[in-house]
Image: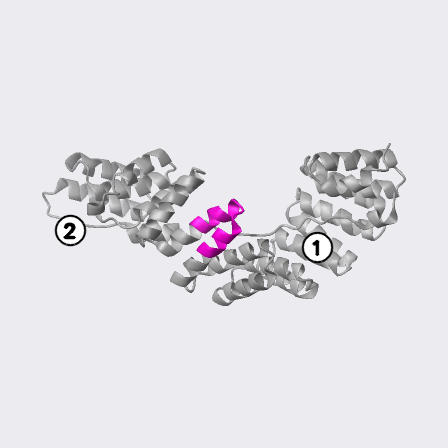
């Protein structure tokens, strides 16, 4: 086994990419409900307004029953279908929600945000193409266009269509210049495109808009690591930890940055802290295995990699790292087994080690 291969241990860094994809849904629902004036004899309208009041306080099941009553008196009433659709969405009755909202897409109904909400429901159903189609219609009609661009961008990101995602996040920001989540997520898109300077600028803008959004510090740290600014990365992760002391992701990532800085003991302290918060966190066990290897604690490295595999049986990096540590313990058979397993799990780097295996 050549010496150069013995130093290629791989860290697992967890990157927070997105804000909560439902961050503005509640406000949107509250903004979209429409109350009407009525006369005492108008039974349908009375039921409708009662449904609206229940919808506002989150009593969705009772709201649905009131909208049912309203539609008995006024069949085909678009406003009742629309708001019942919103209530069905919140009770996870997505088929019924889609059916109601589709009854409100006639131009003469002039109900705002129908296509936007259809897009939201299709996202929840994991039907990406229908979601994209409806967000696109929402954008064409300029109905909640900033949000429609934002959520369509999320889909493109998950499909690894980073240029399209970047373009949509940019449009969302143009329409809503204080859109913190869009800055954060465009930063993550730029990071995937290896535009690290652009990513850092977007993360810093998101922090400027909302200094309490912890996940942005984590993302900023990851972009700074890519730039080789390990000190800056550690500072960013530390801010995330200070704001959220139980943030095991930030502890794990700060530990990885400390390995980059060759502070292996400090890295182990961070991985210990992550595991104290989440004791089945496979990434932290694998990364602690790397730090222990660097300190020539090969037995400890094997033990930690084994724990990582215990919690994730398909963790290819952990198999490869365990194989490297086993080789140093003069266990070539065990090392070869692990490297072959890592290769089977898609870790192409492991193939470099297998050549010496019999």
Residue 239 on the magenta segment: no
Image point (81%, 45%), residue name:
300
Q: Which residue is mark 2?
A: 37
Report whether 144 appears left or right of 358. left
Local secondary structure at mark 2 = loop
Visible in this render: residue 165? Answer: yes
- Check the image and name the residue furthest to the front: 163
- Residue 306 image position (x, y, % from top left): 76, 39
Query: Main structural element of the magenta stretch: helix, strand or loop?
Result: helix
Q: Which residue is mark 1?
A: 256
Where's the C terminus, which quadrant?
Answer: top right
Q: Which residues are magenta?
A: 152-168
The span from disc 1 to disc 2 (Cα, nearest Å) is 61 Å
Residue density around tag 1, few if under 14, some if 14–19, many if 20 or more, within 10 Å: many
Crowdedness near tag 2: few (<14), some (14–19) or many (≥20) residues, C-alpha within 10 Å? few
The quadrant holding residue 66 is: top left
Which residue in the rendered view is the most extreme toward the top? Answer: 358
Q: Which residue is found at the position 23% from the left and 43% from the top?
A: 106
Badge 1 marks a residue whose secondary structure is: helix
């Amino acid at each position: 086994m050549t010496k150069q291969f013995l130093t290629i241990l791989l860290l697992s860094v967890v990157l927070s990419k997105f804000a909560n994809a439902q961050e503005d849904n509640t406000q949107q629902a509250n903004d979209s409900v429409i109350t009407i004036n009525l006369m005492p004899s108008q039974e349908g309208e009375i039921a409708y307004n009662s449904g609206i009041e229940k919808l506002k306080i989150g009593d969705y099941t009772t709201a649905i029953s009131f909208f049912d009553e309203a539609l008995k008196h006024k069949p085909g009433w678009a406003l009742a279908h629309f708001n019942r659709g919103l209530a069905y969405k919140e009770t996870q009755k997505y088929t019924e929600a889609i059916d109601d909202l589709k009854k409100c897409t006639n131009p003469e109904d002039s109900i705002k945000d129908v296509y936007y909400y259809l897009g939201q429901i299709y996202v929840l159903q994991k039907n990406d193409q229908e979601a994209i189609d409806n967000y696109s219609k929402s954008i064409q009609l300029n109905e909640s266009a900033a949000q429609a661009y934002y959520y369509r961008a999320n889909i493109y990101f998950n499909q690894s269509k980073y240029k399209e995602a970047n373009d949509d996040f940019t449009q969302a920001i143009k329409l809503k210049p204080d859109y913190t989540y869009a800055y954060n997520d465009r930063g993550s898109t730029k990071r995937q495109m290896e535009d690290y300077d652009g990513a850092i600028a977007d993360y810093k803008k998101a922090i400027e808009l909302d200094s309490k959004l912890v996940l942005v510090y984590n993302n900023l740290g990851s972009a700074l690591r890519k730039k080789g600014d390990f000190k800056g990365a550690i500072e960013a992760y530390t801010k995330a930890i200070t704001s959220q002391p139980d943030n095991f992701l930030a502890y794990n990532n700060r530990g990885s940055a400390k390995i980059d800085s060759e502070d292996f003991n400090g890295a182990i302290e961070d991985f210990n802290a992550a595991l104290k918060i989440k004791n089945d966190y496979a990434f932290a066990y694998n990364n602690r295995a790397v730090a222990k290897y660097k300190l020539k604690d090969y037995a400890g490295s094997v033990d930690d990699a084994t724990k990582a595999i215990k919690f994730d049986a398909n963790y290819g990096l952990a198999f490869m790292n365990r194989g490297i540590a086993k080789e140093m313990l003069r266990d070539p058979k065990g090392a070869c087994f692990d490297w072959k397993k890592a290769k089977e799990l898609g870790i192409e780097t492991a193939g470099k080690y297998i050549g010496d295996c019999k």
